[in-house]
Amino acid sequence: MPAAVGRLFRGRQGRDTVSFYLFVLPWLLGFIGLSIFPLLVGLATSMTNYNGFNLDNLKFVGANNYLRAFGDVDVPFSLWRTVYFSIINVPLGLALALGIAMLLNQRVPARGTFRTIFYLPYIIPIVAQVWIWRIFVDKNFGLLNAIISIVRPDTAIGWLVDFPTETLIAMTVWSAMGGAMVIFLAGLQGIPNELKEAAITDGANSWQVFRNVTLPLLTPVVFFQLVMSMINSLQVLVAPMLLAGKQLGQMPARDNYMFQVHVYQQIFVNNRYGYGTALLWLLFVVIVILSLLVFRSSSYWVYYEVEQEGGQK
């Protein structure tokens, strides 16, 4: 056996193999140590009564934490609020990002400057984003109420109290739109102009060119954006909590009580590490199921220029 292994690593191919594994080794060690190992520890923790301090009487409770979640009234409520938020946030954000990308893909003056302006919110830290929006929607001194007061004097709408979810959606769309716009721009610039010109020559108008040429060729990008936006939206945590007050641990409005907020409360407020980790694994299962459904549906609406497995093009 050692002789066979020695022969395997002799010669140019053997040296290339050794070089490959040496280059891959740092990433592999990081992946195992920072991804696989924490996942296994989290799975093990979800089956214990761990509360952060009881290592001396740590007990294995099996699936009790998972069963407990089905009796927790805040679990279906927070999950529904998260799904409701995602149903509005994801398509609205993608539609606006695509629209802006199409506008900035035209030959317009200072389009580089406009691209930068629209991209800037994406790189602003989340804490700064929340403070910008808290100032913007302030009930007494906010710019939004000041603008509305032009047509409706003495407006004092408490956006963070009366419309918490709508404010959260607006802030999330504003902050994420720049990243999605850049990816859509890359996709749009990869579409051959010859196809658009041929459609126009055949008498197609702008809407027909978009519907029959641009959008089908852009569906792989839309598919990628949809999956990533859905995953990020279902894990929203910091924004609703910071919109609620100045401290991260402050409870948000009930309408903004998202699933991850409930997990945060269980782990860091109630010290139920085992139960909170079980909730995270349940969210993981929900995200996997929804992602698989989107992947399964892609065969009906995603167009690929090269032939895919199963004969789709």
Image (tube, grey):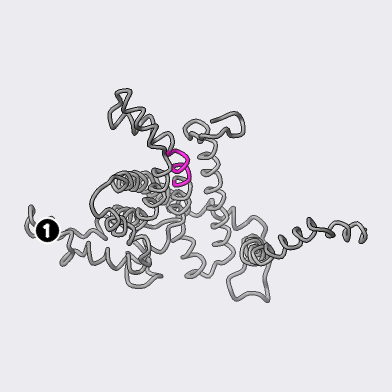
Residue 307 as seen in the image, left or right of residue 154: right
Whole-percent x and y of residue 124?
35, 66
Whole-percent x and y of residue 266?
50, 64
- Kindly identify the amino acid type of the residue bearing the numbered disc 1: Thr
Q: From the viewer's perspective, is residue 141 above or below residue 302?
A: below
Q: Report the residue at 26% width, 60% height from top.
A: 161
- Which residue is tagged 1? 155
Q: Report the residue at 43% width, 43% height from top.
A: 190
Q: Quarter of the image holding residue 16?
A: bottom right
Q: Which residues are magenta?
A: 218-225
Majority SS type along the magenta span: helix
Q: Report the residue at 62% width, 66% height from top.
A: 34
Of the 4 image quadrants, the one containing the N terminus is: bottom right
SS state under label 1: loop
Identify which residue, 185 or 289, lies in the foreground: 185
Q: Is residue 174 magenta?
A: no
